[in-house]
Every structure is written in C-alpha cells, then in structure tokens.
Image (cartoon, helix red, strand yellow):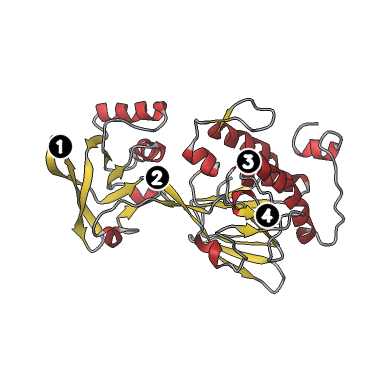
Amino acid sequence: MPDAGSQSYKTDVIIIGAGPVGLFAIFELGLLGLSSHVVDILDRPGGQCAELYPEKAILDIPSRLKITGQELSQDLMAQAAPFHPTFHFQQMAEKLEKLESGHWRLVTDLGTVIEAPVIVVAGGGGSFMPKKPKLERLEEFENKSLFYSVRKMEQFRGKNVLIAGGGDSALDWVVNLQPVVAGMSLVHRRNEFRGMQVTVDQMYSLVEAGKVSLQIGDILRLNGDNGQLKSVTLKNAEKGEWDVACDAMLAFYGLTMKLGPIADWGLNLEHNHVPVSTENFETSTPGIFCIGDMCAYPGKLKLILSGFHESALMAHGCFHYARPNQKLRFEHTTSSSAIQAKIGAS
C-alpha cells in the first residue's frame, strides 16, 4: 500500500528502490518474518525495468522464456503482496542518521520519517532524476509553477496546465489530470507518441472532445514573473512562434540516473558503486546492505537474476539485526507449512 507522506513509521527493514531486486527483497525478507517499507522516487514500482523498457522482452529470467519489464514488475508485486509492504513512492531517501538505539532514522524529501534496524540499498545505478529542458529562466519557475512529477493531484485542481512530453508519463498525466484541471494542453515536438497505444488513444479522444489542446512544436521560452508562469512560447516550421497560456507546467522529458544523497551517507564508494561482502551483501557500515546493480564485488554481473540471489543472502544477514535475540531457522518453501500459509500456497 502507498502512504500519504509526512508521517512517521517503524519497520524491520527500509528498502531504498522499488525495482525488481527491491521487490524480490520484500519477498525474501517476508519469508523470514521481516516487514518492509520501500522508498522510491518514481510514481510506480518496477524501477528502470518498468520505466525504461516496460514492453521490451527480458529473456534471462529463470523459467520465463520471455517477459516484459512491466509483466515482471507486476508478478513481483503479486509475490510480495502477502507480506503487506508499505510503499513511499515519489519520494527520495534524503537524510539518514544512526540513533542511540542502534536503529536507523531515514527522512525523505517529503518529510516522511521511517525508523528501522536495517537499511537495504537496492537503487540500481542510483536515483532516477528528471531530464530538464534547456531553457532560460528554468530555475526561476522550478517547484513553483514548473514541475517534473505529480506529487499531489490536488495541487493542480482548477489550474490551466501544460504538459510537455511524448512518453508514458506525459500521456498518463494528461488522462489522469484532465478531469481536475481548468484547462489542459499537451506539447510535443511531433505528432507521434512513445506511450502505450491505449493511452495514446485516450489522449486523442480527449483532443477530439475539445478537453485537451494538442500543440505540436518545440518550447522556445517560458513567460511569467516571480516564479509564476503565464504562458509558454512554442515554435515550429509551419506556424513560427506562438504562445500557449498556462499557470502550471509539467515537463516529462525522461529520466537519468544519479547517485543522489546516498553519496553522503558515509558508505565506501568505488566508481559510484558500493563494495559489499558476498556472505550477506552488507556494506562497510554495519546494518546497511546493498543489492542489485549498485553493489560491487569480484565477479559481479549486472543481471536481475544476480540481484535475486543477492536478495536471499541479504535477508539472512538482515535477520540478525532485526531479531537479535532469535535464532534464524532456515526452511524451504516446498516443505514449510508455515511459509506456505504466509504466502497463501498451502
């Protein structure tokens, strides 16, 4: 279940990153009776796998001859569901401090506070950060009337919104925000879109109904004062320049990977990767583990299936921090009635 932000929580393990490896970690931790909260800067699970190639076939997942990034993410969510993880989407893990109790206190950029004895970094190559358009005065409007994500839909209620982009994120928000805004414009440099066809069709239906204004052209400049947009100037070869009125703009030009605040957490770093012990994938900092593409060790292969193996060993390492007074009892899912009951497979 997602959370509403700006709240405080306690759990056994905080997982940073909701990509395939982070999602499978929920399952492996759950088998040992450990609860998880998951923080991810994206607005949905799946990480790079679902965001960058949702419909591209993945051919090296054991037992699956072919599976798309979106299908894999959906299956992993279903597998994790019996353990009732809490997701904190569209939030960046920003501050981390060690408490006197030995637990960790993590604060996101939205003010959500989570306390746990264990941190698991499963952020792939780092945090997804928005690609920004190369426009003058950009910083003047950022986080005031120009945004790169939708944190709360109510923020845009009754406004004249312009969305820039031609991929899934842009089209999804055109469809989802249109009912709550006063006016909606979609700007793209050409009349071809990269999103899923069903969403493209929904967008065109809204255009035909006069509920969305489709503008084909490049954004030339931003117009307004004191951080408040009034219009955006567009340009194309046929029409030249023209202005489109708006008082809020959402720019969806794709994502890039950056290490983000994790670089300031005191972990040993080698070329933006975190060295780990292959016994349990713990970092040089006790109580912080790293799995997936971000971890480094001799022979490391950046494969999803490698991350699944890392998740299993990591979970056993986490158990000793989360349950220091209990003995870990290893059981196979094929023979443990207790585990089968947990996951509804008995």
Label 2 neighbour load within 10 Å: few <14, some 14-19, many 20+: some
Q: Amino acid at mark 3?
A: Ile
Dot 1 or dot 3: first in sequence order is: 1
- Quadrant of residue 84 in the image? top right
Label 3 neighbour load within 10 Å: few <14, some 14-19, many 20+: some
Q: Amino acid at mark 2?
A: Gly
- Please state the horizontal and vertical placement of residue 35, each as a whole percent of the image: 70, 51
- Please state the horizontal and vertical placement of residue 277, each as a whole percent of the image: 73, 58
- In the picture, the disc for residue 297 is 4
Label 2 and label 4: CA atoms lie apart by: 30 Å
Dot 3 or dot 2: first in sequence order is: 2
Label 4 and label 3: CA atoms lie apart by: 16 Å
Label 3 and label 2: CA atoms lie apart by: 22 Å
Dot 4 or dot 3: first in sequence order is: 4
- Quadrant of residue 206 in the image? top left
Give the residue pinned by disc 2.
254
Label 4 and label 1: CA atoms lie apart by: 53 Å
**Labelled pair 4, 1 in contact (Cβ < 8 Å):** no
Dot 2 or dot 4: first in sequence order is: 2
Label 4 neighbour load within 10 Å: few <14, some 14-19, many 20+: few
Dot 4 or dot 1: first in sequence order is: 1
Q: Residue at x 74, y 46 (%)?
A: 312
| Image depth: mark 3 or mark 2 in front | 3
At numbered mark 2, what does the secondary structure look like: helix, strand or loop?
Answer: loop
Compared across the picture, whether 252 is left or right of 62 comes to: left
At numbered mark 1, what does the secondary structure look like: helix, strand or loop?
Answer: loop
Label 1 and label 2: CA atoms lie apart by: 25 Å
Give the residue pinned by disc 3.
304
Q: Residue at x 41, y 26 (%)?
A: 198
